């Protein structure tokens, strides 16, 4: 029974640390750019888009597909950075809570 109490306490501590981590991730921001800086996307640490900036110069083109591709590329770069940041923050939690490959918490 003593071990069960200890496990419950550890689970509660881990839950509190995860809640703190969620708050940290909510405040973090990662940006991705494409087209030499023509398009910039900023995501918070949970993967939600905070901003999208598009240089007006690319609207002089009739190539909407190019603009769409630049937005997607910038978003994907920002998303990759968010995932890297999230994994590095999770590694800081004592006890080494390692997430299985492909499990993309917190989103």
Image (spheres, rainbow, N blue to C red):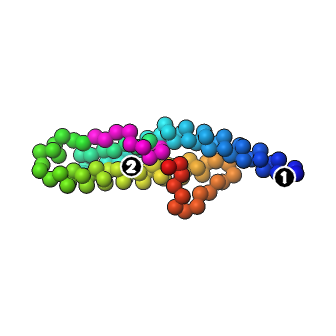
Q: Secondary structure at mark 2?
A: helix
* Residue 66 numbered mark, or none: none
Name the residue at the right extreme.
1
Label 1 with label 2: CB-CB less than 8 Å: no
Residue 48 percent coordinates (x, y):
42, 43
User: Which residue is pictured at 66% across the width and 40% down the height?
Assistant: 16
Q: Residues within 10 Å of mark 2 (few under 14, many from 20)?
A: many
The reply to whether the magenta stretch includes residue 49 is yes
Residue 7 percent coordinates (x, y):
78, 50
Name the residue at the bottom extreme.
101
User: Which residue is pictured at 51% across the width and 42% down the height?
Assistant: 25
Q: Is residue 84 left or right of residue 56?
A: right
Instruction: Report which residue position mark 2 lands on.
Output: 78
Q: Secondary structure at mark 1?
A: helix
- Cα–Cα gap, marks 1 and 2: 43 Å
Place residue 24 in its image quadrant: top right
Residue 22 percent coordinates (x, y):
56, 41
Please say whether residue 16 is visible from this viewpoint.
Answer: yes
The mark lying in front, picked from 1 and 2, is 1
Q: Is residue 66 left or right of residue 26?
A: left
User: Which residue is pictured at 20% across the width and 55% down the height?
Assistant: 65
Image: magenta residue range: 45-53
Instruction: Report which residue position mark 1 lands on.
Output: 3
User: Which residue is pictured at 49% across the width and 37% down the height?
Assistant: 27
Vertically, is 27 above or below 102?
A: above
Earlier-in-chain disc, 1 versus 2:
1
């Amino acid at each position: 029974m003593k071990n069960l109490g200890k496990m419950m306490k550890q689970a509660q501590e881990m839950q509190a640390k995860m809640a703190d981590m969620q708050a940290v991730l909510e405040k973090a921001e990662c940006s991705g750019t494409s087209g030499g800086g023509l398009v910039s996307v900023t995501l918070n640490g949970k993967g939600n888009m905070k901003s999208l900036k598009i240089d007006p110069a690319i609207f002089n083109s009739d190539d909407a597909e190019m603009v769409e591709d630049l937005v997607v590329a910038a978003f994907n770069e920002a998303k990759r950075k968010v995932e890297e940041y999230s994994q590095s923050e999770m590694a800081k939690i004592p006890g080494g809570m390692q997430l299985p490959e492909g499990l993309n918490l917190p989103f």
